[in-house]
Amino acid sequence: MKPARFEYHAPETLAQCLALLAEHGDESAVLAGGQSLLPLMRFRLAQPAHLISLRGLGGPLERIERRGGSLYIGARVTYTAVQRSAEVREGCPGLPRSIELIATPAVRTRGTVCGNLCQADPASELPAVALLLEARMHLHSAEGTRVVAAADFFQGPYMTARRGNELLVAVEFPVRPATERFAIREITRLRGGFPMSGVAVALTPGAGSALESVAVACFGVHSQQLRLHAVEQVLRQRGRTPAALQAAGEALDAAIHPHSDPFASEAYRRSATRTLLERVLAEACAQPSNPP
């Protein structure tokens, strides 16, 4: 199918881009890599009257920068650029590992991290990782700037806190502790396809089975990505013992509301998510600190 009729804009400066967003607001869509937006437009699931391209914008929007204790990834930075960045591999190694699961190499050379976060697809890995790693979204408009924590940014399936006149210019990931370990697993019908269930964990082991810190998030199994605070509380208090894993699984069951579709039933998604939780915990605990 062909997209509905739209007007194409190619601003050459950030100020021009923000002026267009101020003028057209919710009738506009921002085009970065286009790997999510363009298929939606072809099927007319998205019908923006104005398409605003970021192609002519450079500067910070196309850079990965480490400032202080954070990594900043600009709006035009592709998945592949993040995967190849030595700064990202050193400061936030879980991010390139997560990107490895996304689609195919061809898609990763075009798609952008910020575009993925703005799409807020419930089955996507990166919004869950943003929740897990407590990312912050830097939003600019003609009226000013604001910073929104990932926990407040994702508001539902395909819904975010970004306003129609705002551009997500960068996402900020705190640099991870050297002692932290990260693991992510998912179940898909085809490699690179949308997951039927996925779980990611970032943790710091303590003595024996104790965990000094733990963060858990899931995706592809709920109406939106979830940070599983109840599961984290069980694991922090009781460590990674068999009894604690059982209790953590029960907390997971209470937190998620899986759906059924032609690819997987509600019962399958629930069972798979519990299994993935156990596997990512075991994988993370078996790793050396921040492996390359």
Image (cartoon, rainbow, N blue to C red):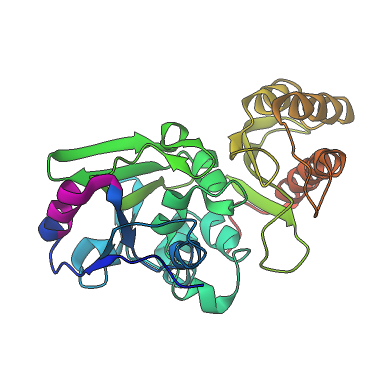
Residue drawn at point x = 59 percent, y = 64 percent: 102
Q: Is residue 22 magenta?
A: yes
Q: Is residue 3 left or right of residue 17?
A: right
Residue 159 in percent (x, y) is at 46, 40
Front residue of this view, candidates 89 and 52: 52
Q: Is residue 70 above or below residue 75?
A: above
Magenta-colored segment: predominant secondary structure? helix
Q: Is residue 204 in sight in this rendering?
A: yes
**Quadrant of the image containing the C terminus:** bottom right
Residue drawn at point x = 70 percent, y = 42 percent: 221
What segment is highlighted magenta in the picture?
17-26
List the single residue furthest toward the bottom.
106
Q: Is residue 154 above or below residue 86?
A: above
Residue 259 in percent (x, y) is at 75, 39
Q: Is residue 135 magenta?
A: no
Q: Is residue 166 in sight in this rendering?
A: no
Front residue of this view, candidates 131 and 255: 255
Residue 240 in percent (x, y) is at 79, 32
Residue drawn at point x = 32 percent, y = 65 percent: 76
Question: In the rendered image, which quarter is residue 87 located in?
Answer: bottom left
Residue drawn at point x = 29 percent, y = 46 percent: 26
Q: Is residue 251 left or right of residue 289?
A: right
Front residue of this view, candidates 243 and 147: 147
Q: Is residue 255 above or below residue 42?
A: above
